[in-house]
Every structure is written in structure tokens, then in C-alpha cells.
Amino acid sequence: MRKTALTFISLLLCAVCAFADRADNWGRDQTAIEALLQQKRYADARKASIKLTNHMLDHMGVSDEAALLARTVALRAAAEDGLGNVDDTNWYRQVAKLLDPQVVLPTMTTPVPEPIEVRHVGLPEADAASGKTEAPQRIRKRDPERPGIVNALGVAMAVIEVAIDVDGVVKQPRVVSSPAPSVSYAALEAIKQWRFRPGTKDGKPVPILFHLTITMH
């Protein structure tokens, strides 16, 4: 019994040490990306942030390192801002806050967009006598990259609430449910590429609030 307890403690200590090593390495990589941003080497910073994010997705646990992932995504947003990519800046800025509401965002020149006024399909105000609201229809889908944590979970499902804008683009994401930060990010990164035939009211495109379910095996 005592031997079993000692083995468990040893394994636990190994896991803690491995997490500390990963966190230190990722922290150093983030510092390097910050240096690239300060040098205005935005393309290099973007490339490095994507590489680091992908490495983190392969090695993150169920709840560990959410703040570290959020910081990396925030650095991606700053790189996109420096490159003048407005839509990507806004997207990754939002994603960073979804992963960790306490994340400190770098200074960016891209203004924060005004929230989109959305309609709720099926609610009385959406189906008023003046005309029925029709739901968006997906016309392009991208499957998510499989984060490493799925190996332990077996299957992972994320539910994301989004606004489908009048141009059929996914905006204003919100994580409704997800088993791990890496699953949330993988789902968000996938639906960013999805496109829809926009929802309509009286035959005219309108922004619609929509729930998307992404399953990873």
C-alpha cells in the first residue's frame, strides 16, 4: 500500500515538473514574440505565435495553461493588428478574452467593433407578423484540428454561440460549453473559416444568433 502511494506521489511530482517546464518554455517563446512585435516584425511575430499555439494545442491538459494559451492568442492579435488585418485582429482579440477574461491585451490600433444586433430564430419577436426570420444555412465547413487532449478524453464536444452576419461570416463568438481550453480554441479556429448563406427576414439578410456544435474524436 505504501509503495503504491509513493508511486502515485512520484508520478504526480513528475507531472507537476513537466507542467512547470512547459510553462517556462512557452513563457520564453512568448517573450521572444513580444520582442518581435516591439521591433515591428509583425509577419515574423504572427508566424511564431501560430507555431507556438499549435505546439500548445498538442500538449495542453484539460484545464491547465488556459492563461498561457490566451496570452499567445493575444500576441497573434497584436501581430495581425500590425499587419493591418482588421478582421483577424478582432477575432483573435475576442478569442483571447474567451480563453482567459483576465488576459492583458497588447496595445492595438484596430478599434474594437460595435456589437452586432442579432435576431433570435424562433422567438416571437423574430416571427412577428411583419415576416418570419429564416435561419442561416452553412455553405462551407472546415473540420477542426485535433488537440492532444482528445487522446485522453476520447471524444470532445464544444458548443459555440456566434453571430452569423449579413455577409455569412461568423462573428462575436462565445463558448457555451467545452471540456478544455485547447478544445475551445480548436473549435473557434475551425468555425472562423465557416461560411453561411445568411439568415433572412422578409427575404433580406439579417444577423442571426446561432449555436454551432463541434465534435472531435
Image: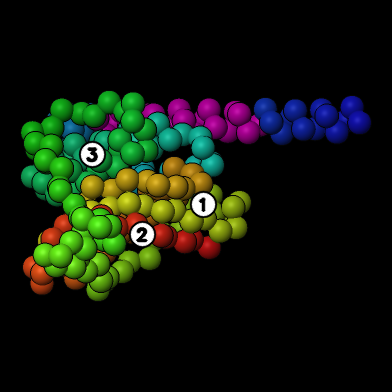
156 left or right of 169 in image? right
Query: Could one spot residue 66 in this view of the protein?
Result: yes
Element at badge 1?
Answer: loop
Marks 3 and 1 in Cβ contact (< 8 Å):
no
- The outermost residue toward the front is 129
Which residue does the numbered mark 2 point to in the structure image? 212
Q: Position of residue 72 (x, y in %)?
A: 32, 37
Say what amino acid the circle numbered 3 marks.
Arg
- The outermost residue toward the right is 1
Marks 1 and 2 in Cβ contact (< 8 Å):
no
Q: Residues within 10 Å of mark 3 (few under 14, many from 20)?
A: many
Color style of the picture: rainbow
Residues 160 and 104: in front is 160
Say what amino acid the circle numbered 1 marks.
Gly
Query: Could one spot residue 82 in this view of the protein?
Result: no
Q: Quadrant of the N terminus?
A: top right
Q: In the drawing, what numbered circle is on residue 190?
A: none
Say what amino acid the circle numbered 2 marks.
Leu
Magenta stretch: includes residue 20: yes
Q: Position of residue 152 (x, y in %)?
A: 61, 51
Q: Residues within 10 Å of mark 1 (few under 14, many from 20)?
A: some
Which quadrant of the structure image shows residue 137?
bottom left
Of circles 3 and 2, the one toward us is 2
**Residues drawn in magenta:** 14-34
Magenta stretch: includes residue 133: no
Which of the two discs, 1 and 2, labels the residue nearer the N terminus? 1
Which residue does the numbered mark 3 point to in the structure image? 93
The answer for how far apart the CA atoms under marks 3 and 2 are is 20 Å
Which residue does the numbered mark 1 point to in the structure image? 148
Which of the two discs, 3 and 1, labels the residue nearer the N terminus? 3
188 left or right of 112 in image? right
